[in-house]
Amino acid sequence: MKQKSSQSKKPEEKLQKYLANYGFANRRNVADLIKESFVRVNSKKGNVNTLVKTGDVVSVDGEEHVIDLNPEVELLIYHKPVGQVCSSKSRKLNESVFSSIPPRKKGKWIMVGRLDINTSGLLLFTNCGNFANFLAHPSSSIDREYLCRVYGDINDKKIDKLLSGVKLDGQDAKFSDIVPVKKHGKSRNHWFYVCLFSGKNREVRRLWSSQKLTVNRLIRVRYGSFILPENLKIGGWRKVSKKDLSKFNNLYANT
């Protein structure tokens, strides 16, 4: 993806914004990171108002990074397996998704949204916090598609309800599309492709649950125009080509 424009290149910005935009901490916690961690810029102690520019060296708890305020945006597709957690750190019994993707020489990978521990499939990572926010924010109207196996008694009334909308924690939620997969035999398990334009916590599972139905397998297969490659093995990753990434260039450039 090209930069937004040569005129919009940043000569400098606050350390706080840089650390948030390039994955060192989320926007809510970055001030605490600077306050509580050993953060230096060009060997000098930094604070939230410190200005940084391309070529400066920022050190966070002894780990050094060369600052690039105008990097070329990159995007990585990862095939998440069931059992991994969408967290920066592994748990005692569950490995972090970050343990399976390549480390960056500059900055860090930033996860676009999340998948719960029992959901597999397409997970996106980028090197740019602003781009990650663009991809995940509902105002961007980027849909997500899932293949799900649903257990229970399903009828047209329940499907219509999920398409027209239900209340989840007092907020409206619905699928934008539900496409059944041909069923074989008399099993009470049913396969569907479903789409929605938001990524709230466990939203697909909770939507089906609102109709007293249980999702017992869930795979994300698409995020906008980015499709999980059929030949990408579970636990594998692949960088999105500049050509495919350019499909979002005009949309992102105008945000």
Image: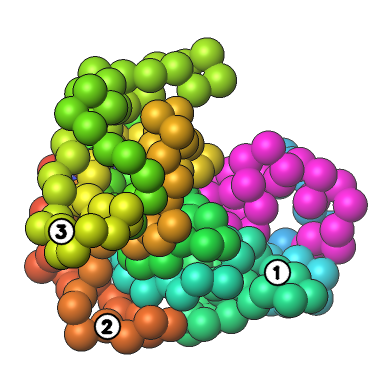
- Secondary element under disc 1, as helix, strand or loop, is loop
The x, y position of residue 81, in whole percent, is 46, 75
Query: What residue is drawn where x is 34% and y is 62%?
Result: 219
Q: Nearer the viewer, mark 1 or mark 2?
A: 2
- Secondary element under disc 3, as helix, strand or loop, is loop
Residue 232's label in the rendered image is 2
Q: Nearer the viewer, residue 28 or 157?
A: 157
Which residue type does callout 1 highlight?
Answer: Lys
Query: What residue is drawn where x is 28% and y is 27%?
Result: 158
Contact, mark 1 vs mark 2 (Cβ under 8 Å): no
Region of the chain picked out in magenta, as a range: 13-40
Q: What is the C-alpha distance between the residues marked 3 and 1?
A: 40 Å
The x, y position of residue 94, in whole percent, is 67, 74
- Secondary element under disc 2, as helix, strand or loop, is loop
Q: Earlier in the sequence, mark 2 or mark 3?
A: 3
Residue 89's label in the rendered image is 1
Q: What is the C-alpha distance between the residues marked 2 and 3?
A: 26 Å
Query: What residue is drawn where x is 27% and y is 83%?
Result: 232
- In the rendered image, the residue lying farthest to the front is 186
Which residue type does callout 3 highlight?
Answer: Lys
- In the rendered image, the residue lying farthest to the right is 36
Does 229 appear above or below 121?
below
**Residue 78 horizontal side relative to residue 47, left or right:** left
Q: Earlier in the sequence, mark 3 or mark 1?
A: 1
Which residue type does callout 2 highlight?
Answer: Leu
Disc 3: which residue = 183
